[in-house]
Image (spheres, rainbow, N blue to C red):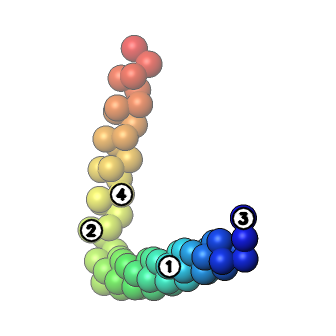
Amino acid sequence: MDYTDSMNTKEMTDQITDKVQDWQRRATKTAREVGQVTDKYVHENAWSSIALAAVLGCVVGYFLATRRD
């Protein structure tokens, strides 16, 4: 491996690192926005959110209980 190969490898590594960091920043931003919207919805619709969570809990419990049989 000569100097140009190591430079290409370094450049490729830097590009990949930049792309991964950019993806991570976008994912973090999106997750934060989703969290804020969800928080606002739950605060505005508390009882609906509680009912939905209860129904989902019952459904998950049902499927877990039927797996054991």
**To which quarter of the image does residue 64 belong?**
top left
| Residue drawn at point x = 60 percent, y = 80 percent | 11
Q: How many marks?
A: 4
Q: Is residue 28 visible?
A: no
Query: Cα distance, mark 3 to mark 1?
Result: 26 Å
Disc 3 packing (10 Å; few <14; some 14–19; many ≥20)? few
* Residue kind at label 4, given as amino acid type: Ala
Q: Is residue 40 visible?
A: yes
Foreground: 10 or 35?
A: 10
Give whichever of discs 4 and 1 has the lower sequence position: 1
Disc 4 packing (10 Å; few <14; some 14–19; many ≥20)? few
Q: Report helix, strand or loop for mark 1.
A: helix
Question: For residue 53, which numbered disc appears in the image?
Answer: 4
Q: Residue furthest front?
A: 2
Residue ID for mark 3: 1
Query: Cα distance, mark 3 to mark 4?
Result: 59 Å
Q: Mark 3 or 2, which is nearer the eye?
A: 3
Q: Is residue 49 above or below residue 59?
A: below
Give whichever of discs 3 and 4 has the lower sequence position: 3
Query: Cα distance, mark 3 to mark 2?
Result: 64 Å
Residue ID for mark 1: 19
* Residue kind at label 2, given as amino acid type: Ser
**To which quarter of the image does residue 15 belong?**
bottom right
Q: Position of residue 2 (x, y in %)?
A: 72, 71
Residue ID for mark 2: 48
| Residue drawn at point x = 33 percent, y = 50 percent | 56
Query: Cα distance, mark 4 to mark 2?
Result: 9 Å
* Residue kind at label 1, given as amino acid type: Lys
